[in-house]
Image (tube, grey):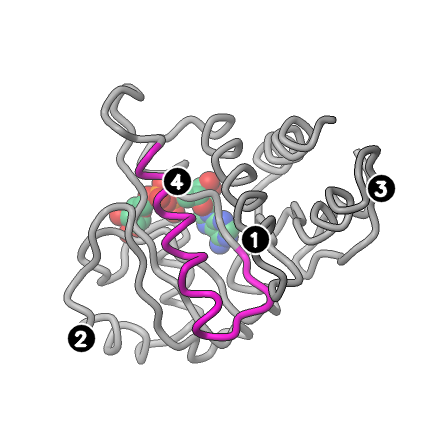
Amino acid sequence: MPASVLAKGNAGRHGGGSMSGGKHGSALRQRIEVVEGDITRQTVDAIVNAANTALLGGGGVDGAIHRAAGPELLEECRMLGGCGTGQARITKGYRLPAKWIIHTVGPVWRDGRHGEDDLLRSCYRSCFALVEPHRIRTIAFPSISTGAYGFPMERAARVAVGETKTFLERNTSVENVRLVCFGSTAFQIHGEALEEVFRP
Ligand code: AR6
């Protein structure tokens, strides 16, 4: 795995990375980054929150984002009136380094036969749909649904990388999509998914 694509640390490193294959594919891959760190510390235009349908905060990454952004975030979220599974809503980032927070609601894992993959794909697509209208050029995602909602991480990581690749194939304005992994196991799993999706 090229070290420049898989970076450890809160900030992550940009660019670099080489891959065999076409020039276009190589450039595209350099816009996807897997880092290990805390999403609340990412200096990007937007971070994504793995929220619930109420959008009123919770545990896991949702709790961490609300704590770091401050109480104004909850005030804005109260006005949104919730969010359906697979959809996304955007708020300001308040005290975060990120200007925007995109809140999405991942599926609760049951057995994989209840539309979980499609709903997770829909989360990534709904988030990406908000990128262009808000002129977002750098965006960081947590591993949606893989904590309290129990989605198997290997499978979720393939969805995350696959949807990111599909989006970047048609978008030219986004410079960096950062998949932020909480811990070394998550980092390794996402690195492997990146290799697999881009394998020539
Ligand atoms: N930075 C990056 N990733 C994190 C962080 C962090 N600070 N903290 C946790 N993770 P979860 P879900 C990882 O449970 O499964 C909430 O209560 C974590 O290790 O946060 O979508 C909501 O309100 C895991 O891999 O979200 C909902 O009720 C991933 O983020 C529910 O949990 C997602 O774990 C949503 O469950």
Residue assigned mark 1: 170
- Between circles 2 and 3, the one closer to the viewer is 3
- The amino acid type, in three-letter code, at marker 1 is Arg
Quadrant position of the N terminus in the picture: top right
> Looking at the image, is 50 positioned above or below residue 172?
above
Residue at image position (57%, 58%) is 171
Residue at image position (24%, 46%) is 85
Residue assigned mark 2: 79
Q: Are marks 1 and 2 in contact (CB under 8 Å)?
A: no
User: Residue 8: image x %, image y %?
Assistant: 72, 48
- Residue in the foreground of this view, choosing between 132 and 191: 132
Q: Earlier in the sequence, mark 1 or mark 2?
A: 2
- The amino acid type, in three-letter code, at marker 3 is Ser
> What label does residue 121 carry, if any?
4
Q: Are marks 3 and 1 in contact (CB under 8 Å)?
A: no
> Looking at the image, is 26 positioned above or below residue 53?
above
- The amino acid type, in three-letter code, at marker 2 is Met
What is the C-alpha distance between the residues marked 1 and 2?
33 Å
- Residue in the foreground of this view, choosing between 130 and 83: 130
Mark 3 burial class by Cα count in 10 Å: few <14, some 14-19, many 20+: some
Q: Secondary structure at mark 1?
A: helix
Q: Earlier in the sequence, mark 2 or mark 4?
A: 2
- The amino acid type, in three-letter code, at marker 4 is Arg
